[in-house]
């Protein structure tokens, strides 16, 4: 298929390889229940009152070879809003389990996500189309399977933003308003409200996650476990060869490697996932399930955007690498009977540790424009910087992006070096006291290190700008788009889509989005803290 051979959405040819390959739930009752012995349940989306297409990702549509449909009501909105199933689709919800906040939670599954089917994109790769917020499934437990507009806007925008940042992620094709009201208690404080509903169409080669394997291992469903592992290897890791004990071990090692690279990228741009349960970890090493995520507005290793995690901070920014390792140990346990060699699994975990260390070290070096010296911060340059950034409120994105403007020549005054960084500080006056002196000392050491490396300034700056985005999806910016969309104005969503497709470019016409969190956003819901319903 050529890049210009776009198909109307209604003419897509759907395949159902996952459905054909795995054990189906024999029951058809769409009520929350335990589903033993199956990988998925057949279930159709619940129709909505007045589906209307609010937003569409043109780059993803082009990759899929789908012609852009008109916004508003219409047949495409009906399909992507869950009110119509096209010929060839065999919708289903997947069954999986997971460890949530460190505890085994038993059966979980797609409680508000329904996969419509699979299509081939313009490169020949299989892609699943999945609706999030499409209604109740057998895995919904006590929930209604719906999603509200605010969470849907956040998922739609962040999926595409992360892709253009160069971070492995699932994608989002469309955002559809349903015309239905959805009742949510945003902070679980006894104040439920009716909010506008919405559905996001998520896209990925596979939505299989660690928890799909955990549930089979926990329930002693050995045949299902092996069938799923073999299927994932044959269709998503074919370079590893035919499944068998050695291939399973190599597969776990590659999952560990991909997960390490993904988390290092999160850390590079200041992204905090917020709910790194094992059921939210992709078997392909993709960022999956955008719930109470956030971006570091002021640098804080202990910050979490998730109100549910406010006390323990299990999933805070500085813990993400260790939590990913812990999650991989849970996956290793689920795969242990297949691999049959604990040393091989430990080797896979060591691959994670080494890969994360090397990747994070190189990314930090790129952010600072210095030479990576094998992962050892021998002069304390990075450790000391992180300590300084945390002593007073400092915007991570602005600080690192502005570092390229710091004059680094010998004989430059401390005031001249600090001046380009002032906009990164929430209290610039702090730079006029002891903190400013400590920052000046660090900048002098940094300048000496750069001069020691001897890299040409143009190359160094280009490298730094390629590692330090100028534009990220700050929570307060996303909330402004949500507020506007709630009134029917989607222009801010369109603007953000455009800006976030080029996050490393200067884009001076959008300089207002390169700014510290405003005071009004400190306590506004959706801007500082979010819940799992956000």
Image (cartoon, helix red, strand yellow):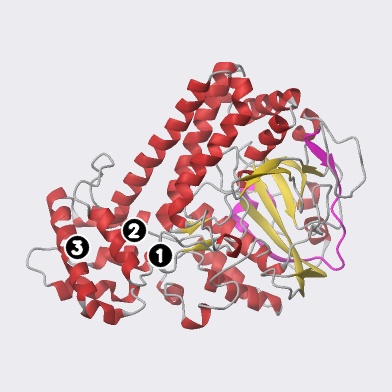
Q: Position of residue 277 (x, y in %)?
A: 60, 48
Q: Do the residues labelled 2 and 1 touch (CB within 8 Å)?
A: yes
Question: Which of the pair 81/411 is nearer the observer?
Answer: 411
Which of the two labelled residues, at mark 3 and mark 1, occupies the earlier sequence position? 3
* Image quarter of the N terminus: top right
Mark 1 surroundings within 10 Å by alpha-carbon count, few (fewer than 14), some (14 through 19), many (20 or more) = many
Mark 2 surroundings within 10 Å by alpha-carbon count, few (fewer than 14), some (14 through 19), many (20 or more) = many
Mark number, residue 470: 1
Question: Which of the pair 490/371 is nearer the observer?
Answer: 371
Question: Which of the pair 104/88 is nearer the observer?
Answer: 104
Element marked by disc 2: helix
What's the distance in space between the residues labelled 3 and 1, CA to CA? 23 Å
Mark number, residue 442: 3
Indicate whether residue 60 is drawn in magenta: yes
Above-or-below relation of 152 to 514: above
Q: Where is residue 19 in the image (x, y as percent from the top left)?
A: 79, 34
Which of the two labelled residues, at mark 2 and mark 1, occupies the earlier sequence position? 2
Mark number, residue 465: 2
Q: Give the range drawn in magenta.
A: 38-66
Above-or-below relation of 196 to 240: below
Furthest-left residue in this view: 411
Q: Position of residue 452 (x, y in %)?
A: 12, 50
- The picture quadrant where one finds residue 33 is top right
Residue in the image at 42% along x and 75% along y: 516
Which of the two labelled residues, at mark 3 and mark 2, occupies the earlier sequence position? 3
Residue in the image at 66% along x and 39% along y: 211
Q: How many labels does the image show?
A: 3
Residue in the image at 76% along x and 54% along y: 112
What's the distance in space between the residues labelled 3 and 2, CA to CA? 21 Å
Determine if residue 529 is in view: yes
């Amino acid at each position: 298929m050529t890049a210009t051979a776009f198909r109307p959405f209604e003419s897509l040819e759907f395949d159902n390889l996952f459905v054909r390959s795995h054990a189906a739930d024999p029951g058809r009752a769409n009520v929350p229940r335990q589903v033993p012995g199956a990988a998925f349940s057949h279930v159709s989306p619940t129709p909505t009152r007045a589906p209307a297409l609010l937003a569409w990702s043109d780059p993803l549509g082009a990759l899929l070879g789908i012609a852009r449909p008109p916004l508003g009501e219409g047949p495409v909105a009906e399909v992507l809003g869950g009110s119509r199933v096209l010929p060839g689709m065999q919708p289903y919800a997947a069954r999986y389990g997971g460890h949530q906040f460190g505890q085994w939670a038993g059966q979980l599954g797609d409680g508000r996500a329904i996969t419509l089917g699979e299509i081939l994109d313009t490169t020949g790769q299989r892609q699943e189309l999945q609706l999030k917020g499409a209604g109740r499934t057998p895995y919904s437990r006590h929930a209604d399977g719906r999603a509200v507009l605010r969470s849907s806007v956040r998922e739609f925008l962040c999926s595409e933003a992360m892709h253009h940042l160069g971070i492995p992620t699932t994608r989002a094709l469309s955002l559809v308003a349903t015309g239905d009201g959805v009742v949510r208690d945003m902070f679980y404080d006894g104040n439920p409200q009716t909010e506008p509903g919405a559905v996001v169409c998520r896209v990925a080669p596979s939505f299989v996650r660690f928890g799909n394997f955990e549930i089979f291992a926990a329930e002693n469903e050995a045949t299902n476990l092996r069938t799923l592992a073999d299927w994932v290897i044959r269709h998503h890791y074919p370079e590893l060869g035919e499944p068998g004990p050695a291939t399973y071990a190599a597969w776990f090692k590659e999952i560990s490697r991909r997960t390490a690279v993904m988390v290092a990228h999160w850390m590079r741009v200041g992204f905090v996932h917020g709910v790194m349960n094992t059921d939210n970890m992709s078997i392909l090493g993709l960022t999956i399930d955008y719930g109470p995520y956030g971006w570091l507005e002021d640098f804080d290793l202990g910050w979490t955007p998730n109100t549910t995690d406010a006390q323990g901070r299990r999933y805070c920014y500085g813990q993400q690498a260790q939590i990913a390792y812990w999650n991989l140990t849970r996956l290793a346990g689920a795969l242990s009977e297949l691999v049959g060699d604990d040393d091989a699994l430990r080797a896979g975990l060591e691959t994670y540790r080494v890969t994360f260390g090397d990747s994070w070290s190189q990314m930090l070096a790129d952010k600072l424009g210095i030479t990576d010296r094998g992962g050892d911060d021998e002069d304390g340059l990075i450790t000391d910087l992180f300590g300084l950034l945390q002593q007073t409120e400092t915007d991570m994105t602005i600080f690192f992006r502005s570092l390229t403007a710091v004059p680094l020549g010998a004989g430059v005054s401390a005031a001249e070096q600090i001046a380009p960084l002032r906009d990164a500080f929430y209290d610039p006056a702090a730079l006029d006291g002891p903190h400013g002196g400590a920052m000046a000392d660090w900048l002098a050491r940094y300048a000496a290190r750069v001069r020691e490396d001897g890299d040409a300034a143009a190359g160094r700056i280009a490298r730094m700008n390629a590692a330090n985005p100028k534009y990220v999806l700050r929570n307060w910016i996303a909330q402004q788009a949500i507020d506007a969309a709630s009134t029917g104005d989607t222009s801010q969503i369109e603007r953000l889509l455009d800006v976030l497709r080029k996050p490393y470019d200067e884009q001076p016409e959008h300089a207002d989005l390169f700014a510290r969190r405003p005071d009004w956003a400190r306590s506004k819901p959706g801007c500082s803290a979010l819940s799992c319903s956000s």
